[in-house]
Image: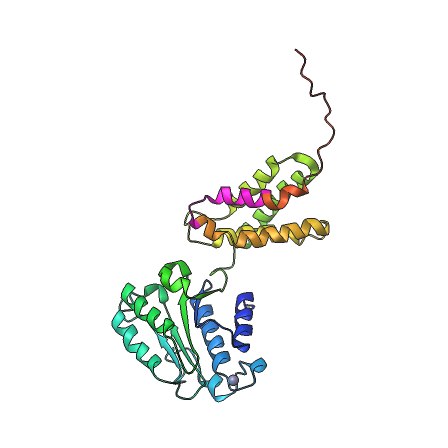
Amino acid sequence: MSESRQLTRALDLVRRGRLYPSVILHGGTATARRGAAVELARALLCAREPERRPCGACPHCQRIAWPDGEVERFHPDFGVLGRDLKTVTSAEATREWLRGAQVAPFEARGQVFVVAEAETLSAEAGDALLKAIEEPGLASPRHFFLLAPNRLDLPPTLRSRSMGLYLGAAEPPDEAKLDQAAAGFGGAFDRFLAGGGGAYLLEAAAVLVRAGDFADARAEGGFELAAHAVRAAATDPARPAPVRRRLLALAQAVLEAPPLRLRGISAERILEGLLSEHLAPLAPSAPPKATTSVVRR
Ligand SMILES: [Zn+2]
């Protein structure tokens, strides 16, 4: 699987010493989130020159690993907090774990703390964590990674103080569904381009609404599938470049649409609005009317 673009960007921030103290790693599978946390932690603590981080070979890189009980690797400046109760990461466990954050790094130039299932933090545990994140005047850099399937499951206070790093959909979209959505969208869009009128933009939007699942306002999969379908149309070499550029911009806007859905706007309204905003300017100029518009009485 290819590294997500957001992860690449975050690694670049690490190498430039610009990564936020708190990052929410959301989306993707649990394995992908853990892998990304380890990769970023290695990059943060790696002994090599910035552009080579993470090197994977230095004593820091080699010992930073996800604690899964199989590999006996341990780094004193890399801590992972797991869920201690059945469905909750308790305040007690969080406070105990954060004690490690009150001391200076043992070996590396900084420290990395990872909350494995941040969506299970109790409210009190979240507050304790927030205090640690906001603690001023640290002598050495300290980073917190909060892992969760969906960043919206974290308290707003933590979200507002963290950078979000989205690792993509948990499951790759169903290929057949995707092809169908792409074909339906492309067909309606072509009829619009051929002068069929705005009704075909509405039809194109309806295809996307039918293709994705928008029942859960917090799920982002529906918009991802819609963006895939739009991007498929954008990569069709038969379309002229200006059309493809507009489609690509639309695909990007669709990917950024989930917050609108959270404000209670229906997926249908959002997609119709975005399609109209990005694609309506491509409408061919109205053909001369075949019949006179003068109504005789
Ligand atoms: Zn290294």
Residue at the location (44% across, 54% down)? 219
Q: Residue furthest top?
A: 297
Q: Is residue 185 left or right of residue 17?
A: right
The x and y percentages for residue 42 are 48, 80
Quadrant containing the C terminus is top right
Identity of the residue furthest to the front in this view: 137
Q: What colouring does the structure picture have?
A: rainbow
Front residue (pair 59, 261): 261
Residue 188 lies left or right of residue 13; in this view the side is right
Tell me the chief SS of the magenta region. Answer: helix
Image point (73%, 49%), residue name? 240
Between 216 and 72, the residue placed more toward the observer is 216
Q: Does the stretch in magenta take in 265? A: yes
Residue 269 painted magenta = yes
Q: Is residue 87 visible?
A: no
Residue 220 spot, x, y in % from top left? 47, 54
Residue 133 located left or right of residue 199:
left
Question: Which x, y percent locates residue 293?
Answer: 69, 21
Q: Establish if 36 lies above or below 166.
A: below
Q: Quadrant of residue 116?
A: bottom left
What residue span does the magenta drawing correspond to? 262-276
Q: Quadrant of the N terminus?
A: bottom right
